[in-house]
Each structure stands twice: as structure tokens, then as C-alpha cells.
Image (spheres, helix red, strand yellow):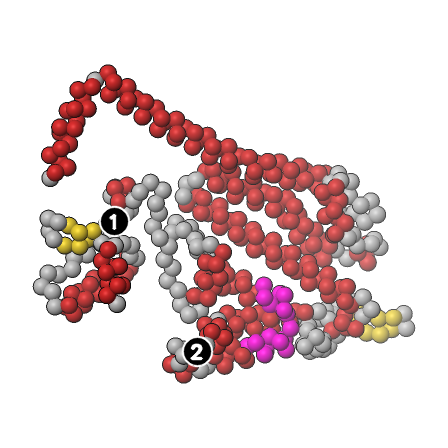
Amino acid sequence: RRKAVAHALNLCNYDVTRRCLIAEGWVPRSMLPATRAALQSATDGAGHAAPAILSPVDLSGPERAHHLAPGEIPPTFFRTTELTAPFQAIVDAYGTPCADEINPAPFAVVTFPFFFGLMFGDVGHGLLLVAFALSYVCNERSLRARERTMTELERFPWRGRYPLLLMGLSAVYCGLIYNDWFGNPADLWGTAWHRTPQGMRKDPHRTYPFGVDPLWHHAANGLSFVNSYKMKLSIVFGVAQMTGGLLLSAANARHRKSAVDLYGEALPQLLFLMAVFGYLVWAIFKKWATDWVALARPAPSLITLLIKFFMDPGAPPPDAPLYEGQATVQGTLALVAALCVPWMLVAKPVVLYRRHAAEAFGRRRAARDGSTKRLLDPDSENEQSEDSGPTSEA
């Protein structure tokens, strides 16, 4: 304990004139009253007559340049709850956001469990996970009392009980969409298909209300249909998440008024993503919304479309085109994507290199001008040293 106290005191500066210790630190503005109360409580507990003085420094005004070193930014502090703390830990594992950046943890509260549900969508497995998480949530009071004695294996699900609950609910929801109940389909609302002498036919006036029709799980091509459906859903939501991340990056650059980050990084990345994968998402919805049986045309393969987009964008598959004017659109988007690659890789480094070169030139010029002045006026150095002597002693 004494070692810890001495270590804390060594972090302070000793004022010889006023014979006191001065400590500088960061505190959230909303916690200033609590900090004052803690200092007063420590002073009263120690029995000192001299009070502890807290002098806040407003860094939003002109004093910011005096108290902050060049390039120094305030530390990051996020107020979390038992629900958001695990998701904040996940975000911090990839990198702690700066104080002037948007915190992506609130978005992760929604996206992380939902993407788990997309990957492990099953109603039965999701209900088991929900029941397991509820066993911790409903017994919080008794479990919190023995939290200190928990082993690491017990502490992990205890602290992640709310993410586990959300992940289980997402798995149940996506399992209803996939119509998977421990790997088996459930005919909850009655299938829209019926058997005829010509084979299985779908009722044109009826659609399965929610999720995949259970008859697809018994079809000969059911596995390929369900796997293709899940793959396309993963692409749609994955591109949506990446688009949201790039929009947050653009918002951070705009907030910092950093044109090089906005126009040299966020904008070309967003254009490249939309030109390639945004176009693929649009093609997925276009293929879903088109009745290829009524058109008496084979449905185009999106894998072939994406390969041809990079290999020969001006020549889509002639046997299964997706829409009219496909060659012109794909050629234009491929050109935009190709231009974004050097834009992303070259623009920002060149701007930063020229900026740093200009700063280095300015420092060298200032040093050279100072040396020239001392050579031309050698008495000025003596006068300056004479003037600075009493000040340093004082």
C-alpha cells in the first residue's frame, strides 16, 4: 500500500513556493461534482486543515493550446451499462475510438447479435441459448453476490448474459426466416405448393406468410436453394454494414474538418464499394424481383456476372442477361472502381508527404534564420542570456 501511495505521489509536481502537490489529469465534465466530493471526503478522512483544490481547465477555449501538446488529444471515455459494456469491450479489442470520433459500440449492440443470428439461424438452438441467458438474467441478484468468487469460466457467460440473450433472440428470428427447427422445417401456416398430375405446382394466389416455404426443404434442389438464399442474405447485410462503417468514417472526417481523410480515403472507398458490391446487391434484388418463368428465360448466375464484371465488364453473358444496357452500366462501374484504386492508395500519402515536407522545410528555415541572426548580431545572445538569468532563478 505504501508503495502504491508513493507511486501516486511521484506522478504529482511539487510546488516549492506554496509547498503543495499539483496533479494534472483528465475527468469527464459530468463527473466534476463527484470528483470534488471525493477530494473533500479524502481531505476530511485524512484530517488535514488545508483543503484540496480542484481547478478545471476548459479545453474548448483559448487555453487548449497552452495545456495540450501538439497532436495531443483527450483520452476516450464512454459511459457504459451492463448491456453495452460487453459490446464496448468487443469494439475496444479492435481499437479504441478517439475522443472526437463516433463510438461504433451502440451500432454493434444491434449488428453483432443479428449477424450471429444470420450465421446460426435455428429456432430450436436459439431458444436454448435464450433459456441459458435468461437463467443468468433472472438470477442477477444472487449471482452478483458471489461474482468475486466466480471462476473465469463462470464469469464469461455472466458478464455476457445480455449479448447471449440478444444473440439467442436473433437466432430465433433468423431461424423463423430460414424455417429451421433443429434442422427440420415446420409447416406453421400451410404450404403454398400442391401436388398435381404434372408435378408440384405453387398456388399463384398464395404465398407462405413468413420465411421459407417448408416444402423447399424436401425438394430435390432444396439444399442449393437454401444455401443460395443464405449466401445472398449474407452479402446484402455485409455490404450494408460496410457501408455504415464508411459513412461513420466520413462523418468523423467531416467533424475533424479533415479534407484529406474525407476526399482521399472515405469517398474513394465508398465509391469502390458501391461500384462493385453495391452493384452486386442491386443485382440480387433485381434477380429476386424478376419472374424468369413468365419471361421464359433462364435466370442469370450472379457468380458468373461478378466474374465477368472484372474479367470483361463490357461483355455480360449473352445467354442470360440481367437487364437491357447491362454492358454499358458494368463498363462504367468497372471504370469507376479502377479509378478508385490509385485514388485510395496515392492521394492521401502524397498530400501527407507534401504537408510533412513543408513543415520540415519551415522548421529548417526558422532554425537557419535564427542562426543567421545570432551571427549578424552576436551581442543579442549575451543580452538574452543576461535577461533570462534572473527569470530562471525566480
123 within the magenta span: yes
Task: Give the amino acid at mark 2.
Answer: Met
Q: How many marks are shown on the rendered structure? A: 2
Please state which of residues 357 and 374 is positioned toward the viewer in this rendering.
Answer: 374
In this rendering, does residue 324 appear at all?
Answer: no
CA distance separating discs 1 and 2: 43 Å
36 within the magenta span: no
Residue under label 2: 150
Q: Write down the region rendered in magenta.
A: 115-130
**Residue 339 screen position, x and y as percent:** 62, 36
Secondary element under disc 1, as helix, strand or loop, is loop
Residue under label 1: 58
Other residues around mark 2 within 10 Å, as few (<14) / some (14–19) / many (≥20): few
Residue placed farthest to the front in the image?
Answer: 3
Q: Quadrant of the C terminus?
A: top left
Answer yes or no: do the residues labelled 1 and 2 have beta carbons within 8 Å?
Answer: no
Which corner quadrant of the image does residue 336 belong to? top right
Secondary element under disc 2, as helix, strand or loop, is loop
Task: Give the residue drawn at x 68%, y 63%.
Answer: 230
Tell whether 90 sits left or right of 242: left
Please state which of residues 161 and 228 is positioned toward the viewer in this rendering.
Answer: 161
Residue placed farthest to the right in the image?
Answer: 197
